[in-house]
Amino acid sequence: MQSTAAMLSTRLSRTFLPRAPVAASSAKISRALINASRYFSTPTETPTSAMTENASATTEKASAASPKRIHIYTRTGDKGTSALFTGERRAKSDPIFDALGATDELTSVLGLSREFCEEADNGLAPKLEMIQCLLQDAGANIATPRWCESDAHLKRTEFDPDGAQAALLERWIDDLEDQGLPPLRNFILPSGGRAASALHMARSVCRRAERTVVPLVHDGTASPTVGKYLNRLSDLLFTAARFAAFKDGKPEQVYRSVTSQQAATEARASRTARRGKKVESAEGP
């Protein structure tokens, strides 16, 4: 006895699917069979003509409505090269991809920071999400050398040409400091809770991203506004980390010289030992 799928395949191929072109017919048959296997999973159930028509119509409608699948793997980088926004291919060791990798890493760390900030409900999450979006725009600028001959590419990848986004970061810094943030009087260590510590990590990655972008700015590959934005962003992330610790009520660990601490400990131990010897000599044998 033929299976339900086999019976349906025969009916579809004879009645509902066009003969040409062959490639299109094969694809439609496959889609119809996949769809049919969901509807007719019981071996003893025999599909009627109406059921088959409905299955075919549903498949065609889904195929028309579904967007074309984008594959994550392209295999184009298997030989160690990758493409710029202009289409030019360069080695993955190129300084441009170092900068793109650093800004991508920064975006990822900001995503982690944003999750912790949402948990803490400290009000920083929307700002971090906006920054993540802007870093994508900065990456487009980095991936499009400013000497590109395409005016359309250059215009499309401009980044903060009027400096408005960098100025916004400065206003955010001032606003966070005005919300009761204690003045900074000592060097502090990354600390102050999960949100604060993650923001400190983002700050250090941001500094590295800036260092990779500076040579590209100097040789005219990237716009100076990208470097300026990253510089100001690291300032914001430092302030945001302190603000997150403040909102969480967590202490910031202050830097102390380890050698000074060791010397002080040894001095106290020495004084204690001397006091003990004086007591022993006073009491006598």
Image (cartoon, rainbow, N blue to C red):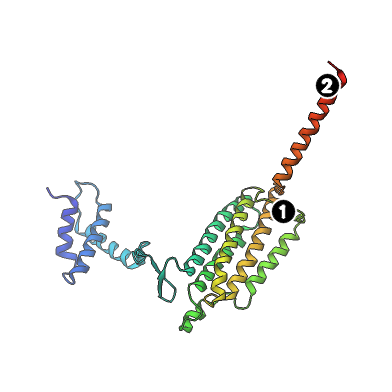
Residue neighbourhood size for the residue with mark 1, other residues' Cα within 10 Å, grouped as few (<14), some (14–19), many (≥20): few
| Residue identified by numbered label 2 | 280
10 Å crowding of disc 2: few (<14), some (14-19), many (20+): few
Q: Earlier in the sequence, mark 1 or mark 2?
A: 1
Q: Residue sitting at 64 percent across and 47 percent down?
A: 193
Asked whether 93 or 161 is in front, the reply is 93
Measuring from the top left, give residue 108's x and y in whole percent: 52, 58
Rendering quarter of residue 71: bottom left
Q: Which residue is mark 1?
A: 187
Going 17% across and 72% down the picture, which residue do you hit? 20
Q: Residue at x 34, y 65 (%)?
A: 79
Per the image, label 1 sits on a secondary structure element best described as: loop
Three-letter residue code for mark 2: Glu
Q: Residue at x 68, y 48 (%)?
A: 248
Q: Position of residue 129 (x, y in %)?
A: 57, 62
Calculate the distance from the C-alpha at mark 1 to the C-alpha at mark 2: 44 Å
Q: Is residue 8 left or right of residue 280?
A: left
Q: Residue furthest left?
A: 1
View extreme (top): residue: 285
Front one among 114 and 280: 280
Q: Type of residue at label 1?
A: Phe
Residue 231 placement: quadrant:
bottom right
For marks 1 and 2, give the one nearer the viewer. Answer: 2
Q: Position of residue 66 (x, y in %)?
A: 35, 65
Between residue 4 and residue 187, name the one nearer to us: 187
**What's the mark number on residue 212?**
none
